[in-house]
Image: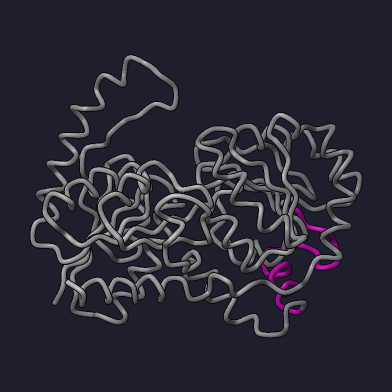
Amino acid sequence: MASIVFAGGGTAGHIEPALAVARVWKSQNPHDEITFLGTTKGLENTLIPAAGFTVSNIPKVRISRTPSLTWARIPFELVASVKACHTLLKGADLLIGFGGYVSAPAYIAARILGLPTIIHEANAKPGWANRLGALFTPYLAVAHGVNTGAFSKALITGLPLRSDVAGALKGAGANWQSVRTQAKTRLGFDAAQPLVFVMGGSQGSVAINKVIEQSVPIFSTKGIAVMHSVGRANSLPPATALYRPVAYVDQMADAYLAADLIIARSGAVTCAEFRALGRYALFVPLPIGNGEQFHNARGLVADGRAEVVDQKEFTLSYLETHIDALLKSSSSAPLEGSTLDADAAQKIAALGQHTLESR
């Protein structure tokens, strides 16, 4: 029996791929012990227990995106977090990290302990935590090819899909038109009416929400139905006959399948899930960070399945001018999804088994 620790918390973008690999690992090694590292504030405290796994929390290292006096606390918080990880990782056989603020102290503690570590990078442009971890281990995996740095030599696995998306992709077979129509009907929309699905990540996007709310009259005039996931932290705007705002969408696989057009951030998980099930997308990359969301969408744009617009250009006027062309592009996009990421979780689990055997 082995003890496997997963590190990747904070956002669904780090948690969902980790959960997908954990499920595969548990199915292949039912007697192994699996633990997740997290912090008290992250989504991991909801998503991971709901999936049947245990979370052990560590102190969070708070790093603001812009210079501030709070940076003076970083060394002290990092030391406390590494110490907590060191305690939790003692006796473990393998650490599998997916990036984010939970992973960085875990990578350092694993290095101190000599614990074998696998790192999976979901974004086309690796984040700082995983770049740090890559200094300590040769066992690297990436969702898609990276041109420079340590991850340019990593195993290309794809991005692990959450269970409902993976199941929908497997079940679609060759009957994509029927599957898309059935999904639209299950969500309660007219199968003959264009449907736009809008989301801004697990927490929602204030910037995207504002533009969509302003655009409701335009959608209604054109006879376009809209399902708008505003995020649990945001208040719901008034609904109309064709505009359905919701705090969160539980039937994400159906939403991807049903939508003629998706308007969303281009996080790595969103791009992978859209690639698997979606038809056509307008991506509005998050304008902060290291620019990874722009890079994430490039492959889908090159495949003729998406367009990208800067947040500052994404306005009421932009949608009024471009919505018809976007739906026309959708109508000529392939009906089929992609199996590019279908076996990603199995590939990462196999790398983990190889790492344990090499030890």
Q: How many marks?
A: 0
The answer to whether residue 341 is left or right of residue 193 is: left
Q: Residue 73: horizontal and vertical position, in percent?
A: 24, 22
Q: Position of residue 299 (x, y in %)?
A: 66, 58
The image quarter containing residue 353 is bottom left
Does 23 appear above or below 194?
Answer: below
Q: Quadrant of the C terminus?
A: bottom left
Q: Residue at x 67, y 42 (%)?
A: 284
Closer to us: 159 or 15:
159
Relative placement, left or right, of 276 versus 166 is right
Name of the residue lying farthest toward the bottom: 174
Point 66% across, 36% down: residue:
209
Residue placed at 33% from the left, 41% from the top?
Answer: 101
Q: Which quadrant of the figure contains the N terminus? A: bottom left
Q: Look at the image and say whether residue 319 sits in the magenta stretch.
A: no
Q: Is residue 83 left or right of residue 170?
A: left
Task: Between residue 268 and residue 353, name the one nearer to us.
Answer: 353
- Residue 169 figure quarter: bottom right
- Colouring scheme, one of rainbow, by chain, secondary structure, one colour: one colour
Position of residue 4 in the picture relative to residue 310 (left or right): left
Coordinates of residue 322 in the picture (x, y in percent)? 86, 43
Q: State yes or no: residue 187 in magenta.
A: yes
What residue span does the magenta drawing correspond to? 178-196
Q: Position of residue 121 (x, y in %)?
A: 43, 55
